[in-house]
């Protein structure tokens, strides 16, 4: 079972990283990160703070968009092009196929987050006083290494990017040490973004198991927006919106995933709230994300088993 699931995950990842829409989203994420430099220059000695805040926010936004796009199109593409049928005629069960799809999507988002996160950390390192020549040397060396690996292992070039992106992120995190507090914020935000994106991916996969790509994207985006506003939705003033609407929205917010957990306030991300230590909070958020992702995947499996693919 594990080998078959991992094979589906690898194939899903390979198809995703070759998609032009993903390249476009990555380019937009880099552009937004570079724009943070301009915004930081307009602030009064708050360059690092602006870069960290804007970078973390745009990273979260584009990661969710990637999760929605992949979740809405990946499964439906298999059905539309009828590549799913020969796969399921083998000893592959539907739940193995769906779990593999989810793992492949999460792996794709992991690479996306590592690359964009490395760009944010590189800017923080530059603002912290690290030599621009050293940063340029690291980037050029990393690109040269990637080109060499591509030449050496042509068949595995899609998968080589995974450890390369993770290593680049780690190096940039080390170089950003002079901006320790902002680096902590970015590292925590990256971890929480991955957890949130896993939930959104599972949510999109759930809707995709019985709906069209357009409706899947709409449903997923709606649940995401409500989940991000969960704390606000549960405390709507009945005198303003009316008791019926306040109860309706509040009940929906209690049922749907609480994605507000993954965008905590800045003081918490900086570890400035003694009663709420940062990394234990992140650990609880990861546990919550794992439980919700598993539940949504289970629902997707049940729906997909009953789906008529003919």
Image (tube, grey):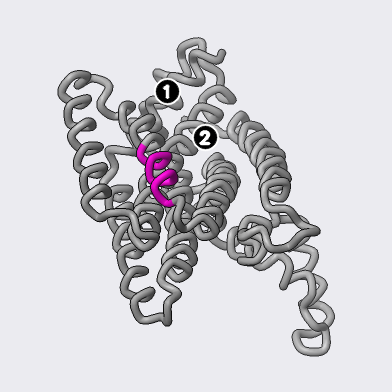
Local crowd at mark 1 within 10 Å, few (<14), some, or many (≥20)?
few
How many marks do you count on the picture?
A: 2
Residue 183: x percent and y percent?
50, 54
Residue 146 as seen in the image, left or right of residue 159:
left
Local crowd at mark 2 within 10 Å, few (<14), some, or many (≥20)?
many
Residue 223: x percent and y percent?
61, 59
When the figure is inspected, residue 118 is found, relative to residue 10, above or below; the finding is below
Q: Which residue is situated farthest in the top direction here?
A: 91
When the figure is inspected, residue 91 is found, relative to residue 301, above or below; the finding is above
Whether residue 171 appears in magenta in the rendering, the answer is yes
Give 28 or 49, whichever is nearer the viewer. 49
Q: Mark 1 falls on what kind of element?
A: helix
Residue 182: x percent and y percent?
51, 60
Give 302 or 194, whichever is nearer the viewer. 194
Give 188 or 86, whichever is nearer the viewer. 188
Residue 241 as seen in the image, left or right of residue 180:
right
Sequence-earlier tag: 2 or 1: 1
Residue 114 occupies which quadrant of the picture? Answer: top left
Q: Residue at the spot x=38%, y=26% of the render?
A: 11
* Image: magenta residue range: 168-176
Residue bearing the label numbered 2: 102
Q: Residue at the spot x=45%, y=55% of the render?
A: 178
Residue bearing the label numbered 1: 85
Residue 240 as seen in the image, left or right of residue 98:
right
Q: Is residue 184 visible?
A: yes
Disc 2 to disc 1, C-alpha distance: 19 Å
When the figure is inspected, residue 277 is found, relative to residue 300, above or below; the finding is below
Instruction: Give the main secondary structure, helix, strand or loop, of the magenta stretch.
Output: helix
When the figure is inspected, residue 194 is found, relative to residue 61, above or below; the finding is above
Q: Residue at the spot x=63%, y=36% of the render?
A: 297
Give 306 or 3, whichever is nearer the viewer. 3
């Amino acid at each position: 079972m594990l080998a078959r699931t991992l094979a589906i995950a690898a194939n899903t990842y390979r198809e995703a990283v070759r998609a032009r829409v993903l390249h476009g989203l990555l380019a937009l994420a880099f552009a937004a990160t570079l724009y943070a430099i301009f915004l930081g220059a307009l602030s009064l000695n708050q360059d690092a703070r602006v870069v960290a805040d804007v970078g973390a926010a745009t990273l979260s936004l584009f990661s969710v968009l990637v999760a929605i796009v992949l979740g809405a199109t990946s499964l439906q593409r298999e059905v539309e092009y009828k590549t799913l049928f020969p796969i399921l005629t083998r000893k592959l069960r539907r739940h193995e196929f769906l779990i593999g799809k989810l793992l492949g999507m999460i792996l794709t988002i992991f690479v996306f987050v590592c690359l964009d996160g490395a760009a944010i950390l590189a800017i923080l390192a530059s603002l912290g006083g690290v030599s621009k020549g050293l940063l340029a040397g690291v980037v050029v060396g990393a690109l040269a290494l990637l080109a060499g690996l591509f030449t050496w292992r042509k068949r595995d070039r899609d998968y080589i990017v995974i450890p390369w992106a993770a290593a680049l992120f780690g190096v940039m995190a080390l170089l950003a040490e002079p901006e320790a507090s902002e680096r902590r914020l970015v590292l925590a935000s990256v971890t929480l973004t991955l957890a949130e994106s896993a939930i959104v991916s599972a949510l999109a996969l759930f809707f995709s198991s019985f709906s069209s790509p357009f409706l899947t994207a709409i449903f997923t985006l709606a649940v995401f927006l409500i989940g991000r506003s969960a704390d606000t939705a549960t405390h709507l003033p009945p005198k303003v919106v009316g008791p019926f609407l306040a109860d309706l929205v509040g009940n929906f917010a209690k049922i749907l995933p609480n994605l507000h957990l993954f965008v905590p306030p800045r003081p918490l991300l900086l570890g400035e709230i003694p009663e709420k230590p940062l990394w234990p909070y992140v650990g609880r958020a990861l546990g919550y994300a794992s439980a919700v992702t598993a539940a949504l995947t289970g629902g997707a499996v049940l729906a997909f088993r009953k789906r008529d693919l003919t």
